[in-house]
Image (cartoon, coloured by chain):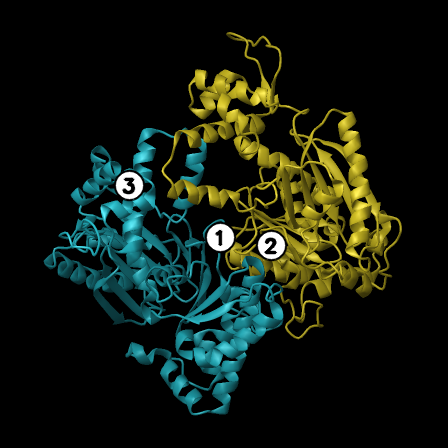
Chain colours: A yellow, B cyan
């Protein structure tokens, strides 16, 4: 599990710099070509060997060898030949839904969520438990989460699926080694490596472990499974108790230099504003986080046992729909603050799209106006590269699906790293 | 000049994705190994063939072939063997100071600057002209700049140097194609590709053209030629009439997704603050830009014919040294605003260092305190990855040196792209 224990978020960069430093060798070529073929199959869902050769520039013989190796590893399946309209029939290749799958887990302030996705990205099993975690000891929360995950794993066993890896999302600062340094809304969570702890508690073999901020994983969920799969560059805003952001650039997660970037919730929107738990003042979270917003709208902020009513967001929506002035005013104010903080992000990153996720998705009808207006005024390049504001299609599931998808994407990006036996056959 | 006309800033990413998409071929290996060897020579300044083989993992025979090809192309020189203390003498290799050189130009609001740097990074010729450009037509400014550059080129000719490429820095939004979209402080500069225009006016062959925001080029200047060459991740803050920022991540310029990122000067530091030329309100530039700061300190803001006194910054320094209260208060306020805006950048990017450049370098003794204090309070990951505040060592030359260095760095990064004949010999 040596390699599996490390987060892989930097892999694209490391791979690039390794290529630049070591002389290329035969094995590197095989590895490169296996991944090339597998990614083409993923992108196209169904492709013949001849089409694969045309798209990759490899010879048909090479493609056949690589495909056979991928089939032996149970990553790819080939359907019976279908007769085309013209010429010889091709056997369409696609990812194997019975191949290795990923277990995802999200531990947030008032719930725990799990799911299993297969290699094709389909959610095969899912479960969410309402759990007021803020004041609980981490062990208690982790036990609840592990019980749910164990149940799910047994369901996967019964369906003949192999769970290959685990991804865990948490609401806090996670470094490149998967260590949670601080979760402002989970009091006792500090210096824990949640994915490793969960793996140990599960007590079953896992080849790949990953832990990250829930907003980063939600951004990946949106990238891989969202409705707009043309979006390759965006900032995903996760409205929960805290306000997080996941940045995707050129189809890759961008975590900042040391992994702790993307902290939208603690961008200053009012230098003299209210003090924040982070030590700052006038942070976005203090105006537009779920609790701040509910408070401003005069609604109670307790956690409800029914997650769908947690923090009274549906009540806020109902009041906004009814045109209640205090509610509308507080939403306008939150949208303006969100626009100011996002402007700073966009002035740095020059991104073409913002995706509103978490409870902001539900409130989007009232937020998009003020957000867009602030971006228009405050983003200096707005005239040349205007930013689109989009609503997340995955709702509360974005993060846990991203967490599960990490495993299957790792396999697709570099199959031989996880199934070294492929190299001998390719 | 087809390839030369394009900005190269995205090359590292393009190269990476090309490697991922096309099957690797023999030529790619040669190209890769040539660059590998040349970058080792650059990093070490003086290296024997045997040392090169040890560092690259290539065989001695391969290294020798590659080195011979690089020497034929006049990129590398080999000194006479020096006797080592132990064993056979090695002939030390280094970059050729008489190899291809780069011409750099900076066009800013109140001056124009040029220089020539050779392959080793040494500045061989330099010239700065004071010129109040704000209200001048671009043609007039460009003619002045081209006259200075022509003179310099003749000096380079006389010294036996071949000027291979041109880099131009401008104070505005420049896209990946080198087009300046907007320069808030140069009224008529819009939709111009300055490097191409200058190249045409010079009327001499140039293989490589590049244009970018002056702060981005200053960041590269600092990266390549600054005193702290261990700094590989930082944001360079360029205090001029405007306030710009150049972001360096893992030794590469990070320009945002569409090239127009890094706009520190237009981050909101006070949502209800004074209106800004950009259309926003309470932008950093309106508090901490040169004119705003001088105005707050009660000093005149006209351009002086003596660049060293331009905008009265030395007067500001003198008053601060004398402890004049209004000056100290305005510097404190500017430093606080700078800290607030930088906090947003650091919350996004999680960078370990800030470099204060332009006139902020001269004012650093009064700015570092308030900047550091705001970062401490407002950057959420400050406790785990504190940000160091460093003062630029290149002063006003950072940008023009970066502009000149672009050319020589392009050659070092991929010599065969610019000297294809090398491939036949390597």
Q: Where residue A325 sits: x, y (%)?
A: 82, 62
Left or right? Give the position of A246 relative to B157.
right
Mark 1 — on which chain does it sit?
A: B
Q: Quadrant of residue B189?
A: bottom left
Labels 2 and 1 positioned on one and the same chain: no
Mark 3 — on which chain does it sit?
A: B
The crowd level at tag 1 (other Cα within 10 Å; few <14, some 14-19, many 20+) is some
- In-front residue for pair A193/A283: A193
Q: Earlier along the polypeptide chain: callout 3 or callout 1?
A: 3
The crowd level at tag 2 (other Cα within 10 Å; few <14, some 14-19, many 20+) is many
Mark 2 — on which chain does it sit?
A: A
Q: Which residue is mark 1?
A: B256
**Residues at marks 2 and 1, CA–CA distance in whole angstroms:** 22 Å
Query: Circle 2 — which element?
Result: loop
Q: Which residue is mark 3?
A: B34
**Residues at marks 3 and 2, CA–CA distance in whole angstroms:** 36 Å
Frontmost of labels 3 and 1 is 3
- In-front residue for pair A301/B140: A301
* Residue B301 seen in this snapshot: yes
Q: Which residue is mark 2?
A: A175
Residue in view at x 39 percent, y 57 percent: B190
- In-front residue for pair B218/B392: B392
Q: Which mark is residue B160?
A: none
């Amino acid at each position: 599990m040596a390699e599996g224990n490390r987060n892989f978020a930097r892999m694209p960069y490391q791979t690039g710099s390794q290529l630049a430093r070591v002389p290329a060798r035969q094995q590197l070529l095989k590895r490169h070509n296996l991944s090339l073929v597998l990614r083409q199959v993923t992108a196209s869902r169904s492709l013949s060997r001849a089409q694969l050769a045309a798209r990759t520039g490899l010879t048909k013989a090479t493609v056949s060898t690589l495909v056979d190796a991928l089939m032996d590893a149970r990553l790819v399946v080939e359907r019976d030949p279908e007769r085309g309209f013209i010429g010889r029939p091709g056997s369409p290749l696609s990812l194997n839904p019975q191949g290795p799958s990923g277990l995802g887990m999200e531990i947030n302030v008032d719930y725990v969520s799990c799911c299993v996705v297969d290699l094709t990205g389909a959610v095969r099993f899912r479960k969410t438990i309402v759990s007021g975690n803020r004041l609980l000891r981490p062990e208690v929360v982790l036990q609840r989460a592990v019980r749910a995950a164990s149940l799910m794993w047994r369901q996967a066993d019964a369906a003949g699926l192999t769970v290959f890896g685990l991804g865990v999302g948490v609401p806090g600062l996670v470094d490149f080694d998967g260590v949670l340094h601080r979760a402002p809304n989970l009091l006792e969570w500090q210096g824990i490596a949640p994915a490793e702890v969960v793996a140990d508690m599960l007590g079953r073999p896992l080849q790949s472990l990953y832990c990250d901020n829930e907003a980063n994983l939600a951004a990946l969920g949106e990238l891989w499974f969202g409705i707009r799969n043309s979006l390759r560059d965006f900032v995903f805003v996760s409205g929960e108790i805290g306000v997080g952001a996941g940045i995707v650039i050129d189809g890759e997660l961008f975590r900042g230099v040391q992994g702790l970037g993307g902290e939208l919730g603690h961008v200053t929107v009012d230098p003299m504003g209210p003090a924040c738990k982070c030590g700052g003042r006038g942070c976005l979270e203090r105006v537009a986080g779920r609790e701040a917003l509910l408070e401003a709208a005069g609604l109670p902020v307790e956690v409800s046992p029914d997650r769908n009513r947690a923090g009274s967001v549906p009540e806020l929506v109902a009041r906004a729909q009814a045109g209640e002035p205090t509610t509308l005013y507080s939403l306008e104010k939150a949208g303006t603050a969100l626009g100011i903080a996002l402007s700073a992000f966009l002035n740095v990153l020059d991104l073409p799209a913002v995706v509103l996720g978490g409870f902001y998705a539900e409130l989007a009808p009232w937020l998009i106006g003020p957000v867009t207006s602030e971006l228009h005024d405050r983003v200096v390049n707005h005239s040349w590269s205007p930013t689109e504001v989009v609503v997340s299609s995955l709702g509360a599931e974005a993060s846990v699906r991203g967490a599960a998808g990490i495993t299957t994407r790792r396999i697709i990006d570099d199959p031989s790293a996880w199934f070294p036996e492929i190299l001998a056959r390719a």
